[in-house]
Amino acid sequence: MPELVFFSGTMDCGKSTLALQIAHNRSARGLQALIFTRDDRAGEGKLSSRLGLVTDSVEAAPEMDLYGYVVDQVSQGGKVDYLIVDEAQFLAPGQIDQLARVVDDLNLDVFAFGITTDFRTRLFPGSRRLIELADRVETLQVEAMCWCGARATHNARTVGGEMVVEGEQVVVGDVSGSAAEVGYEVLCRRHHRRRMTSASARAGVLSPDVLPVVSA
Ligand SMILES: Nc1ncnc2c1ncn2[C@@H]1O[C@H](COP(=O)(O)OP(=O)(O)O)[C@@H](O)[C@H]1O
Ligand SMILES: Cc1cn([C@H]2C[C@H](O)[C@@H](COP(=O)(O)O)O2)c(=O)[nH]c1=O
């Protein structure tokens, strides 16, 4: 039976790499993917991994009918054996419904990849709908780690190096950006709640406030 599968995790846990591996393994067996992404860091119409691999994709624009696009491709003689959808958190809930229809009415597997929650720990609308509709939700095996060594479960946003909890939900960025701009860091829940990034933890250790007080 074809499935809608949501591969989810934090930023930087290997989702895009897995998407590219699935496409590679299947294409070696003659299966052709139709690849959608939205707002990949590498630019429009690209699916990229931090391991350096990148492939062309179809940019899933906000108003695009994904089901209609697949039907058009197939009616024009295009070969579509299954779908890969990266950065699926950015899709509108209605577009996730269209992906479910691709599975049910066109009998194609759809593998969606994305982060579940934003920098405020709130579900992205696209991820919420995926959790509601997917046949399976898979958590990635390679866990990203918080600076403390615990499994990273949350995404923090930094602006000028400081963790923030207010702002636009969508700001494309990376975990290795310069401290001057918007960046991201994956944290465990404990340190997300305490707003302790690796930089603020280091600063805390160096702060004279935490040095032992020597009595006279
Ligand atoms: N230099 C490197 N050597 C080995 N693995 C790396 C290197 N750089 C990145 N990675 C791996 O790539 C992962 C990020 O992959 P990516 O597919 O871009 O993540 P995601 O799509 O989940 O944000 C990291 O968690 C790490 O496992
Ligand atoms: C937490 C969070 C992330 N984003 C953006 C930042 C990146 O461009 C993508 C995630 O990409 P990845 O391949 O999973 O690293 O999402 C955002 O816009 N808002 C957020 O709150």
Image (cartoon, helix red, strand yellow):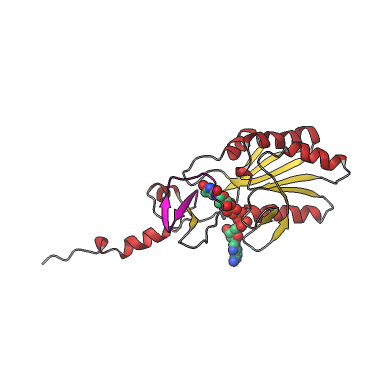
Q: Residue at x 83, y 53 (%)?
A: 29
Outermost residue toward the left? 216
- Relative to 58, say whether 100 is above or below: above
Total marks drawn? 0
- Relative to 74, say whether 210 is above or below: below
Residue 196 left/right relative to 103: left
In the picture, residue 18 is in which quadrant? Answer: bottom right
| Viewer-nearest residue: 165 or 110 | 165
What range of the chain is rendered magenta? 152-171
| Viewer-nearest residue: 207 or 58 | 58
Residue 158 left/right relative to 85: left
Task: Indicate yes or no whether the magenta region holds residue 73.
Answer: no
Question: Does the image show residue 135?
Answer: no
- Relative to 204, say whether 7 is above or below: above
Image location (x, y in percent) of residue 190: 41, 48
Image location (x, y in percent) of residue 40: 63, 53
Image location (x, y in percent) of residue 92: 63, 38
Outermost residue toward the right? 77
Residue 148 left/right relative to 95: left
Where's the C terminus, which quadrant? bottom left
Q: Residue at x 50, y 40 (%)?
A: 122
Where's the N terminus, which quadrant? top right
Q: Which residue is drawn at 75% across and 45% down?
A: 83
Question: Does the image show residue 180?
Answer: yes
Task: Indicate yes or no whether the magenta region holds residue 155.
Answer: yes
Image location (x, y in percent) of residue 209: 25, 60
